Image (cartoon, helix red, strand yellow):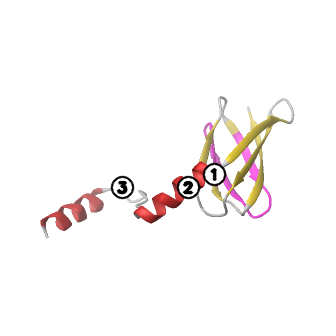
């Protein structure tokens, strides 16, 4: 009972936007990360193509670049967001996803 109460207090004290994963969810994330393959190709002075092969799912895999990312987009049902120097692949359909990135 004491351990459960202590854990409950720790969880309640976390910031509201903190994600809490079960061990199963964490294992699936690390397996998806291990299976993911990616490459980056220049497609202009300020454009790059990030090609990602990853299992289907909502993994929130992040990729960090040397320069700030101005915008990012993907086709085929993938969901991406960019902030600062990072591009986050939030949701990936099975197989290859091409993400177009513009930097400053």
Residue 63's spot in the image, x, y percent?
A: 63, 42
Residue 16's spot in the image, x, y percent?
A: 38, 60
Q: Quadrant of residue 43?
A: top right
Mark 1 in CB contact with mark 2 (< 8 angstroms):
yes
Q: Which mark is residue 31?
A: 2
Q: Which residue lies at the image location 48% right of the left edge and 63% below the top edge?
A: 25
**Which residue is more in the foreground, 30 or 10?**
30
Camera sees residue 21:
no
Label 3: how many residues lie within 10 Å, few (<14), some (14-19) or many (20+)? Answer: few
SS type, badge 3: loop
Q: Which residue is mark 1?
A: 35
Which residue is situated farthest in the bottom direction here?
1
Label 3 or label 1, whichever lies nearer to me, is: 1
Q: Quadrant of residue 77?
A: bottom right
Residue 78: within the magenta?
Answer: yes
C-alpha gap between disc 2 and disc 3: 27 Å
Q: Which residue is mark 3?
A: 15
Residue 56's spot in the image, x, y percent?
A: 67, 63
Q: Which residue lies at the image location 59% right of the left edge and 55% below the top edge?
A: 32
Camera sees residue 80:
yes
C-alpha gap between disc 1 and disc 2: 6 Å
């Amino acid at each position: 009972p004491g351990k459960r109460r202590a854990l409950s207090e720790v969880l309640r004290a976390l910031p509201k936007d903190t994600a809490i994963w079960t061990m199963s969810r964490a294992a699936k994330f690390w397996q998806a990360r291990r299976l993911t393959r990616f490459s980056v190709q220049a497609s202009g002075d300020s454009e790059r193509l990030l090609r990602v092969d990853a299992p289907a799912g909502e993994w929130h895999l992040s990729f960090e670049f040397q320069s700030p990312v101005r915008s990012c987009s993907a086709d085929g049902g993938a969901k991406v967001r960019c902030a600062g120097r990072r591009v986050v692949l939030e949701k990936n359909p099975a197989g290859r996803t091409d993400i177009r990135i513009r930097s400053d």
